[in-house]
Amino acid sequence: MQDADKVFLEYVVKALVDNPNDVKIDRTVDEMGVLISLSVNPADMGKIIGRMGNTAKSIRTLLRIIGMKNNARVNLKINEPEGSTRPVSPMSPMGSVSHNTGSGLGKAPSSLKTVDEAMEDLKGI
């Protein structure tokens, strides 16, 4: 089943949002892997991103695990709704909050494990 990642994402997102009919998922495959683009109702954006982006990070992690199971690299892009404004944050260097919707390839905090490390731990069980 090649669209398992899309089916999974649709199930999870529609369970989280108040407007499930507004959920749109596009899946593209290229030499870099699978890119899934997610669009939701602007009112549901906070439910998908979560506090400090934790919900989005969790969904991305689960999609990557599904991708590993199918020998594919899966990335999630959450499309920002048109006309949305980001709140000003004093912590951000540019004065706006940054929502990382990329591949998450930045350095993880030392207290967190990468997906590869977590998979290795699971193999040892």
Image (cartoon, helix red, strand yellow):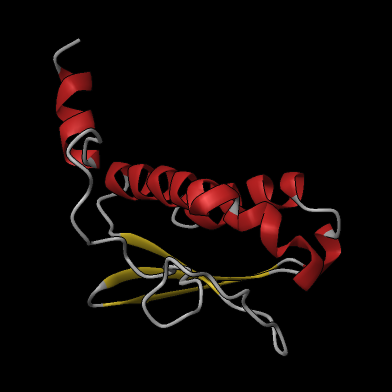
Q: Position of residue 86 (x, y in %)?
A: 62, 77
**Left or right: where does residue 95 sit relative to residue 22?**
left
Q: Residue furthest top?
A: 125
Residue 102: name its quadrant: bottom left
User: Vertical placement of 52 versus 22: above or below?
Assistant: above
Residue drawn at x 31%, y 41% is 69
Residue 123: name its quadrant: top left
Q: Quadrant of the C terminus?
A: top left
Residue drawn at x 43%, y 52% is 60
Q: Position of residue 28 (x, y in %)?
A: 44, 76
User: Vertical placement of 96 versus 9: above or below?
Assistant: below
Q: How many marks?
A: 0
Q: Position of residue 33 (x, y in %)?
A: 29, 69
**Left or right: where does residue 82 sit relative to residue 95?**
right
Residue drawn at x 38%, y 45% is 61
The answer to whether residue 43 is visible is: yes
- Observer-nearest of 47 and 51: 51
The answer to whether residue 10 is visible is: no
Q: Residue furthest front?
A: 90
Q: Position of residue 71 (x, y in %)?
A: 25, 51
- Observer-nearest of 76 and 26: 76
User: Vertical placement of 123 versus 110: above or below?
Assistant: above
